[in-house]
Image: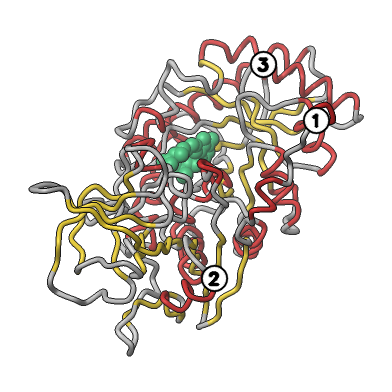
């Protein structure tokens, strides 16, 4: 089976150029660092489009498939334009994500609004902008959405988010489909929800079911189990209530290669499991083949992104660790501190030097836990070197903070030797722009 982009540790255009520096998208990383400053998020357009194509190609054998990019992995207007051009819709979870996707010019019919506690204001914005689907998470939301849709004189098209009761082997905080989860209806609550949808809530139209079992998934069998549960339930609802529900959203989750030890399956392997499980389940439970919806986030954007840092101070603990500090850390990449996530890196201005030292890459934030990479072999990291950390496209910028009152980093898009800013670096004035001194303190 062919490989897919998510199985690469680095963007697919990564090369060493004639000057001996790393280049991505035809752009020398040291020049990018010079021009735009560091820390700098870099997104390689060819890699991003490449994984979108892998998904489309992998699922080309199943006619009724829709792809929604999970914006939570990285949401910006520029990247949304590219993903939208590739034919993907979007999974959004907040007014901010809805508005960003809207600003990218996406057809809002291809947007699904997810989340376990959508506010009335967020729901109203989604209704006003014509968001195509709501994945309803709980009884409170069913009633709220119906009431708000009524007030706008529209019918909201919905899926029901269910908890399929599947445990997958990933970090506890990024597992979502197990039974005691904050997300979705328990299978035993679905009939009560159906009764309300069919008999009380006149402004809701149900199309199908939704589940998401976790993130950074490497095993394919969990998708087989998930599809069996969803198709079985869809078939039961169709016969019991005489309906023609025909949509199954199986969420996201496909993993990526953060380090050499990670071996995620390809989109082609995942597609093979998903399509064959679907065909099996359709026959077993006697329903028409449903539309299948996928919501990948990490696997779409992670590999296309790297972060550039400038190396500053170093400290050799006598007979101990050598700490090499960079000008970013947990505020631009919270994942090592939050999930013990591991990353790989190279020094962009001397990737090929052979005399390696084992060092710890420390962030600049005032917390001992702000360690980006615990142990890595690098060629004599010195002040002024540019460190390139790979696979930072997903859940880095989207989880960034202003901890220590540090400006959020810029993001640049590279392609064909061209670089364009898609997110400006925050300024000191941006940082204080929302602060107010009450009159009585003046
Ligand atoms: N759909 C739903 C309903 C989700 O909750 C998620 C992720 C996705 C799709 C996309 O999953 P992906 O394809 O990206 O695995 N911050 C964590 C990841 C949290 C994922 C939350 N939900 C991290 O940095 O690893």
Q: Is mark 1 within 8 Å of ligand 1?
A: no
The answer to whether residue 115 is left or right of residue 205 is left
Q: Residue at x 42, y 55 (%)?
A: 392
The answer to whether residue 81 is left or right of residue 313 is right
Q: Residue at x 47, y 60 (%)?
A: 39
Alpha-carbon span between mark 1 and mark 3: 51 Å
Q: Residue at x 45, y 24 (%)?
A: 164
Dots 3, 2 in contact, CB < 8 A = no
Q: How many marks?
A: 3
* Residue 48 position within the rendered picture, expressed as x and y whole percent measured from the top left: 50, 64
* Residue 51 position within the rendered picture, expressed as x and y whole percent measured from the top left: 46, 62
Quarter-of-image position of residue 434: top right
Q: Badge 2, how many Cα within 10 Å: few under 14, some, many 20+? A: some
Of helix, strand and loop, which one carries label 2? helix
Q: Residue furthest left?
A: 319
- Would you name the residue on which mark 1 appears? 438
- Would you name the residue on which mark 2 appears? 36
Q: Is mark 3 within 8 Å of ligand 1?
A: no
The answer to whether residue 312 is left or right of residue 416 is left
Say whether residue 279 is visible: no
Of labels 1 and 3, the one closer to you: 1
- Would you name the residue on which mark 3 appears? 194
Of helix, strand and loop, which one carries label 3? helix
Quarter-of-image position of residue 266: bottom left
């Amino acid at each position: 089976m062919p490989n897919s982009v998510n199985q690469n540790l680095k963007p697919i255009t990564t090369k060493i150029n004639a000057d001996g520096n790393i280049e991505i998208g035809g752009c020398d990383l040291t020049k990018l660092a010079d021009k735009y400053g560091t820390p700098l998020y870099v997104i390689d357009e060819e890699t991003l489009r490449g994984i979108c194509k892998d998904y489309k190609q992998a699922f080309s054998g199943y006619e009724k498939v829709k792809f929604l990019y999970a914006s939570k992995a990285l949401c910006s207007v520029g990247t949304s334009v590219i993903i939208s051009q590739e034919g993907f819709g979007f999974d959004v979870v907040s007014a901010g994500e809805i508005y960003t996707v809207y600003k990218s010019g996406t057809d809002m019919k291809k947007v699904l609004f997810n989340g376990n506690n959508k506010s009335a204001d967020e729901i109203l914005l989604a209704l006003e902008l014509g968001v195509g689907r709501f994945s309803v998470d709980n009884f409170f939301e069913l009633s709220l959405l119906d009431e708000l849709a009524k007030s706008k004189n529209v019918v909201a098209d919905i899926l029901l988010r269910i908890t399929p009761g599947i445990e997958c082997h990933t970090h506890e905080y990024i597992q979502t489909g197990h039974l005691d989860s904050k997300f979705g209806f328990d299978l035993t609550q679905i009939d009560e929800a159906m009764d309300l949808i069919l008999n009380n809530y006149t402004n809701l139209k149900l199309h199908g079911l939704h589940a998401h079992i976790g993130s950074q998934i490497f095993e394919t069998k969990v998708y087989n189990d998930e599809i069996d549960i969803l198709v079985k339930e869809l078939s039961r609802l169709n016969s019991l209530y005489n309906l023609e529900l025909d949509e199954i959203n199986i969420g996201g989750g496909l993993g990526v290669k953060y380090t050499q030890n990670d071996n995620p399956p390809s989109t082609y392997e995942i597609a093979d499991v998903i399509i064959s499980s679907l065909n099996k389940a359709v026959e077993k439970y006697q329903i028409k083949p449903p539309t299948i919806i996928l919501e990948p986030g990490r696997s779409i954007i992670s590999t296309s992104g790297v972060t550039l840092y400038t190396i500053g101070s170093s400290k050799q603990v006598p007979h101990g660790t050598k700490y090499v500090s960079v000008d970013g850390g947990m505020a631009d990449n919270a994942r090592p501190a939050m999930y013990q996530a591991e990353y790989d890196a190279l020094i962009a201005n001397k990737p090929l030097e052979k005399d390696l030292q084992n060092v710890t890459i420390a962030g600049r934030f005032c917390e001992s836990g702000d360690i980006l990479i615990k142990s890595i072999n690098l060629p004599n990291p010195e002040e002024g070197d540019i460190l390139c950390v790979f696979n930072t496209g997903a859940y880095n910028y989207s989880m960034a903070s202003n901890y220590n009152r540090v400006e959020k980093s810029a993001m640049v898009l590279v392609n064909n030797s061209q670089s364009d800013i898609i997110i400006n670096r925050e300024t000191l004035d941006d940082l204080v722009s929302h602060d107010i001194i009450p009159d009585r303190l003046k």
